[in-house]
Amino acid sequence: MQTANPKPHVVIIPSPGMGHLIPLVEFAKLLHFHHHFSVSLLLPTSTPPTAAQTTFLSTLPPAISPTFLPCVDPSLIPHNVAHEVTINLVHKHSLSYVRSALSSLSNVVAVVADIFGTDYFDVAREFSIPPYLYFTTNAFCLMFFFHFPSLHETVSCEYRDMVEPLVLPGCVPLYGKDFVDPTQDRQDQVYQVFLNTIKRYIFAEGIFVNTFLDLEPAAINALKTEDPNRPEIYPVGPLIQSGLGGDPDEGQECLSWLDRQPPSSVLFVSFGSGGTLTHEQMNELAIGLEKSGQRFLWVIRAPSNSTFGSFFTQGSNKDDSFGFLPEGYLDRIKDRGLLVPSWAPQIKVLTHESTDGFLSHCGWNSTLESIVYGVPLIAWPLYAEQRMNAVMLNEGLKVALRPKAKESGLVEADEIARVVNELMDGGEGKKVRERMKEFSELARNTRSEDGESTKILSQIAKKWSQNS
């Protein structure tokens, strides 16, 4: 009896961390539900899976199979290095596991790695499988990455000391102090790791970008036309989390609290799955929110000396006592503020009728969720490419306000109160709110059945199916 041809199979390899896992899982869902691919998620790691990861992955259909690769020996990962270095080492020490996995799979039409996984390109080529890159952030950032090797050759000083901004094709001007974190110290190991990684982008068969044409038309056009030797660019976003994730019981308190607030009255405050503040900055933020007089829902973690204090240990900074806040704070804000330790159901919060603003770390996943649901932003970047995102959101797209920091980087309480009130009640806030609603409509259109992002992914899916 003749058997049916097996489904075309795609292997997807995210980096450690929920911020990388979520968009690549959403990409896998699109390939399966819309184009009938089967998908293997190979998950490199240096630590056992977290509860957030296992809960998130437990909802996947059988055709999307996640496999945690063997944990990399912790002795191979130095302490006190940038998290990008840690991710790079995890990938390097997982190459043999990926090679073994590929040798056991059939009908694989593509290997898709994320921004740190370029070493897998060589493994894919060994099996005559075309490698692709899934770029988890925006076209502005990708343009910067492509131009960075040239900057490295032509600029001798630290980039933060450059007097003039960098002007990239199709992009808002960018000062050196806002370049991505790995570029900020040329002597640090992470600088060379970053440079070596992005030099390999050119070896991808194509690059999927989690953005869309109406959001960044000039940057996307420049990426496609500036250099004919670059891989094909596929803007397929916005891809955001379609499941709600987390423990549903954990979110009930904040949702019930939102139900009791007037429509369009609450500022949501959250710094993502890994972001943390110093004790001094947390105190300023607490007092600033109090001084503003606005209602707010704050997802809060214990302070840390690192801005990504819980990047690899999601939720480890949970502290239900809030003893690190100013004395008497909980009593003073109890009628108009709610503090939620560590985690909240972000999409449910952003889509709630009481929510009218989002003070965000500008991680690209959270940013896209804000755009899709039309919630204006206060940009408070912490690490990675978030300062670049903040520049684009504030100066380019004009969908965010950005507080002014002191020379030390500290944002003071009075400035926080000013920006919060401006977003919620001021004229500038009204303008960014209207702009955000326009982009929200464009985001929904591009992911519709006849939308531009949908068509682009359909074209590549057809190409892969023909190669199976």
Image (spheres, rainbow, N blue to C red):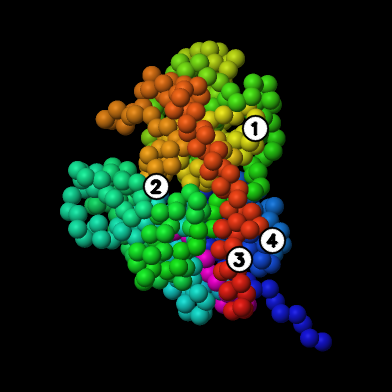
CA gap between label 4 and label 2 equals: 31 Å
Residue 73: which numbered mark, if any?
Answer: none
Picture coordinates of residue 331, whole percent (x, y): 55, 13
Label 4 close to label 2 by CB (< 8 Å): no
| Residue at 33% across, 29% down | 405
Q: Quick one: 269 or 432, which is closer to the camera?
A: 432
Picture coordinates of residue 420, whole percent (x, y): 46, 24
What residue did someone put label 2 on? 385
Q: Quadrant of residue 460?
A: bottom right
Amino acid under disc 1: His
Say if the magenta span includes residue 233: no
In the picture, the quarter occupied by the N terminus is bottom right
Mark 2 or 3, closer to the camera = 3
CA gap between label 4 and label 1 equals: 27 Å
Q: Is residue 319 visible?
A: no
What residue did someone put label 1 on? 352
What residue did someone put label 4 on? 33
Q: Earlier in the sequence, mark 4 or mark 1?
A: 4
Packing grade of label 3 (10 A; few <14, some 14-19, many >=20) is some
Amino acid under disc 2: Glu
Amino acid under disc 3: Ser
In the picture, the quarter occupied by the C terminus is bottom right
